[in-house]
Image (cartoon, helix red, strand yellow):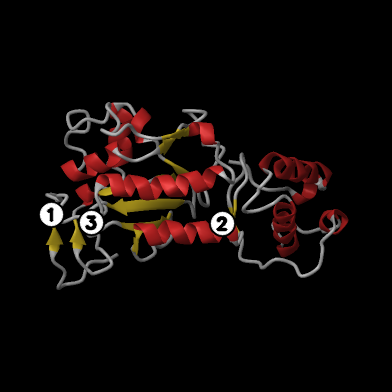
Amino acid sequence: MCARNNATASGSDTSFSTAAYTPKELGAILLDFYIFLTTLHYDRAALKIPPPGGWPGLTSEFCAGLKSDYAIKVIRHLPYFEKPNLHGHNPSQVHYKSELIDYSSCSRRSLESKLSRWQEWGEFESSQGVLVDMKDIISITTGHESGGRELLLDVKHGEITEYEIRGNSLDPVDVRSYFNGLKEAYRRLDLIPCRGMVTIEAYAGEADDNITEKQVCDQAEEWGTEMDIQYIKQIYRQHGWPYAFRRDDAEDAVSKLHDRLDAARGGWEGV
């Protein structure tokens, strides 16, 4: 993300004619991904879809001075998930220690905090090496603690940059390609979500043979071994993951497993 010397600056006068996607197109891309999430671990009833004219409360006046006019138009046309608890973490996480932001319910003070979060980043560039004005960057998620993921949307170039708190950032990726890739990560169970738990980044493959609960419980190591993760994957597959996922039954199975684990082993980290 460091700027190249020959990069051309990109101002905040982004318009429909120069942007890679219109606000409604960006909204549609995110909506497609969010609907996918509702087949897994997000509640469909919590999904908020903007009216045709966008969220009426997110006016240019209400958002004045925080982002470019085009970024504000994008924010107005994005879907959001309603947060069950305004003062705590969302029990549903979209990535490791990462939760989606709902701009439609923000007060002006909250909006200022969320939209100014990356304002002092410095130089930010697109995948083509073009400098991007931070007024054209909005956060889709907020991460917490080391490793938590922030997803930054460049509204002009239509790209997502994934940033790891106290870590590194990945290269910008076309927004549609990024979320299609995230879908595949979920389907492969490279990301394992569970309401009330921190999403697991699962690098271990799935077991060739069936793992028993006794094998898991007989381990002495702290929770998080390869067998632990493979067993969670096995539970999810047994409960229809990803195309016919019986979420409540799978979560009950995970809860019962935790009840049987030795306290010294710990368990799946909660949010």
Quarter of the image that includes the C terminus = top right
Label for residue 186? 2
Viewer-proximal residue among 78 and 52: 52
Q: Relative to the observer, which residue lies in front, 48 or 156?
A: 48
Q: Which residue has dot 1 on it?
A: 11
Q: Is residue 82 above or below residue 98?
A: above
The span from disc 1 to disc 3 (Cα, nearest Å) is 14 Å
Question: In the rendered structure, are the residues bearing label 3 and label 2 in contact, judged by CB atoms less than 8 Å apart?
Answer: no
Question: Which badge, 3 or 2, comes first in the chain's sequence?
Answer: 3
Q: x%, y% of residue 178?
A: 41, 60
Q: CA distance from mark 1 to mark 2?
A: 36 Å
Q: Quadrant of residue 43?
A: top right
Count residues near mark 1 (Cα–Cα under 10 Å), then give few for <14, some for 14-19, many for 20+: some
Would you say residue 139 is visible in this rendering?
no
Tag shown at residue 122: 3
Whether tag 1 and tag 3 are in contact, CB under 8 A, the answer is no
| Identity of the residue drawn at 48% across and 28% down | 87
**Closest to the observer: 124 or 262?**
124
